[in-house]
Image: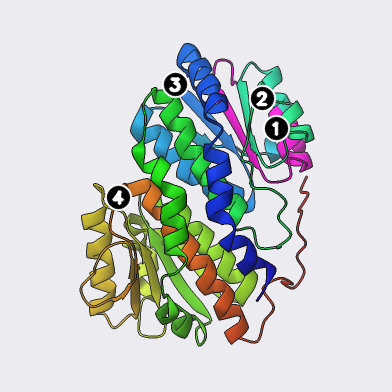
Amino acid sequence: MSLMRDETLEAPDAVARCLAQSAAFAAVGARLRALNPGLAMICARGSSSHAGTFLRYLLGRRLGVVCAAAMPSMASIYGVHQRLAGALFIAISQSGSSPDLLAQTEMARTDGAFCLALVNDAASPLADACNAVIDIGAGPERSVAATKTVLATLAASLALVEAWCGTEAPALARLPERLARSAALDWSALVAVLARSDRIFTIGRGAALGIAKEAALKLAETCGIAGLAFSAAELAHGPMALAGPGFPALGFLQHDAALSHTREILETLAARGVPVLAAGAPVAGATALPGLEPDAPEPDLLGQLLCFYLAAEASAHARGLDPDHPPGLSKVTRTV
């Protein structure tokens, strides 16, 4: 047992608390409809940046908003004022205290952006620097490897986009219960591969790319495995040269327009002798990781990520490592 496992299992309740803030999401959604920004910049580091990747795809696909990833060093190191008047600036952070995110947010607000914080501490300096705040409501997280805060941030991203669109998403109401059911799924096939591997591809396309990036980070953090995260489209270029029997691949798939191409890439890998594990949909030649019946594409990815967290925690133990004490890391990272 570990804090990482305990807090992963708390995620369904954390997500339920987050989604229960319907009035807060509705208020922010109404403000965004009134502002109608065509550009959104998302500022985050680490796991929060992977949630930001997920959110960028949601905003682009559902609202046609042009989305960019912020470069916090523009403000914190180079002192550059970017032209953000009329833009939406979303800062994502667990602690809300990293100096570079705070510097970028303050500069964005000064330059005319509408700044929104997605944080796990509504009293943090980052929250104070923004025009509006969504408290993800995950509660205290002690595990160095963030799990429930990431899942709550992903849920908040889904709810934010629905509120901005002014629509209701029944799949969100079902999400906490589906996450609880996902926790009982058996991903021991992945644990068996990770226990003997020092490298792996993690692959997704669309919103699943954020999940693949998060998986790669957690494998480096908890298991000492070099995870290389790629879009299925990017993998088809240079990285494909690395593929072979000694380089396994973990694919995250969702039932939307990206499914057929991601499946095709994973099938190509399997045909080359790559040990492929697939979550979310069957892939010829791959080991299928169990999942619930499909419900809605993006919310379904949260269930896959919860299962992955549990498998990563078990894999760390299988490799003789303590997932709660990754070498050289601490819970809060403050970068400049």
The amino acid type found where label 1 is placed reads Gln
| Corner quadrant of residue 317 | bottom right
Going 28% across and 59% down the picture, which residue do you hit? 293
- Whether 155 is drawn above or below 186: the answer is above
Q: Mark 2 near mark 1, Cβ–Cβ under 8 Å?
A: yes
Range shown magenta: 76-105
Q: Quadrant of the N terminus?
A: bottom right
Position of 136 compared to 310: left or right?
Answer: right
Name the residue tied to disc 4.
Answer: 295
Going 52% across and 53% down the picture, which residue do you hit? 12
| Corner quadrant of residue 283 | bottom left
- Marks 3, 4: nearer the viewer: 4
- Marks 2, 4: nearer the viewer: 4
The amino acid type found where label 2 is placed reads Ala
**Distance between mark 2 and mark 4 Cα atoms:** 37 Å
- Checking the image for residue 104, the label placed there is 1
